[in-house]
Image (tube, rainbow, N blue to C red):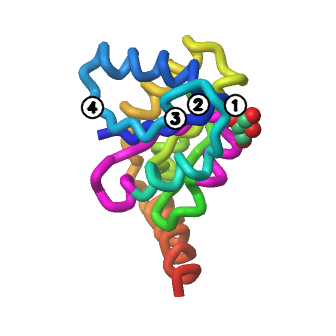
Amino acid sequence: MIALACDQGGFELMGVVRAHLDSKNILYKDFGTFSPDSCHYPEIAVPAAKAIVSGECDKGIFICGTGIGMSIAANKVPGIRAALCTNEYMADMARAHNDANVLALGGRVLKSDCAIAIVDTFLKTAFSGQDRHIHRVGLLNAADRSNEE
Ligand code: RB5
């Protein structure tokens, strides 16, 4: 289950992403926004991010105008590793090295075909499981835990 979150800046691209996921029978839970009207990206990103941490969703695709606001908001939630990607290489590395669980995209930055290629790479790429990357992701998780204390 993929958590989807966008603001007005990502609304149009999210429609393209949603249609692509539908075409591949990939299930998602849509946290909005549901209209092109102005809204506040943290109010949409945080509930969607919490659904990933709780296990209700496996990963997320979060889109705002640049992807910056959505990635910052998502990364405020302990357990989230959100990666703002502008090409397939970044999406590949975000999964293989960082075990990223949220892909952040810029709806006003990327062309649709490029965004879909990034989504496909993010969804198909597994974490490498290499010792050094397990250790580094563990350090990120430890930082989350220390911030909660
Ligand atoms: C909205 O205008 C814009 O600020 C938002 O979509 C995003 O780009 C923020 O980072």
The percent coordinates of residue 84 (x first, y second) are 63, 40
Q: Are marks 3 and 1 in contact (CB under 8 Å)?
A: no
Judged from this view, the residue extending furthest toward the bottom is: 149
Dot 4 crowding, Cα within 10 Å, few <14, some 14–19, many 20+: few
Quadrant of the image where one finds ligand 1:
top right
**Considering only vertical position in the picture, is 99 above or below 4?**
below
- The magenta span reads 51-73
Residue at position x 45%, y 34% in the image: 122
Q: Which comes sooner in the sequence, label 3 or label 1?
A: 3
State how far apart marks 1 and 2 are (Cα). Answer: 21 Å
Dot 3 crowding, Cα within 10 Å, few <14, some 14–19, many 20+: many
3 or 4: mark nearer the eye: 3
> Label 4, on which residue?
27
Q: Is mark 2 within 8 Å of ligand 1?
A: no
Q: Which comes sooner in the sequence, label 4 or label 1?
A: 4
Q: Are marks 4 and 1 in contact (CB under 8 Å)?
A: no
Dot 1 crowding, Cα within 10 Å, few <14, some 14–19, many 20+: many
Q: Which comes sooner in the sequence, label 1 or label 2?
A: 1
The percent coordinates of residue 94 (x first, y second) are 53, 43
Q: Secondary structure at mark 4?
A: loop
64 within the magenta span? yes
Left or right of residue 35: residue 87 = right
Left or right of residue 35: residue 85 = right
Type of amino acid under label 3 = Thr
2 or 4: mark nearer the eye: 4
Label drawn at residue 65: 1
State how far apart marks 3 and 2 are (Cα). Answer: 28 Å
Label drawn at residue 33: 3
Q: Which comes sooner in the sequence, label 2 or label 4?
A: 4
Q: Which comes sooner in the sequence, label 3 or label 4?
A: 4
**Considering only vertical position in the picture, is 8 above or below 51?**
above
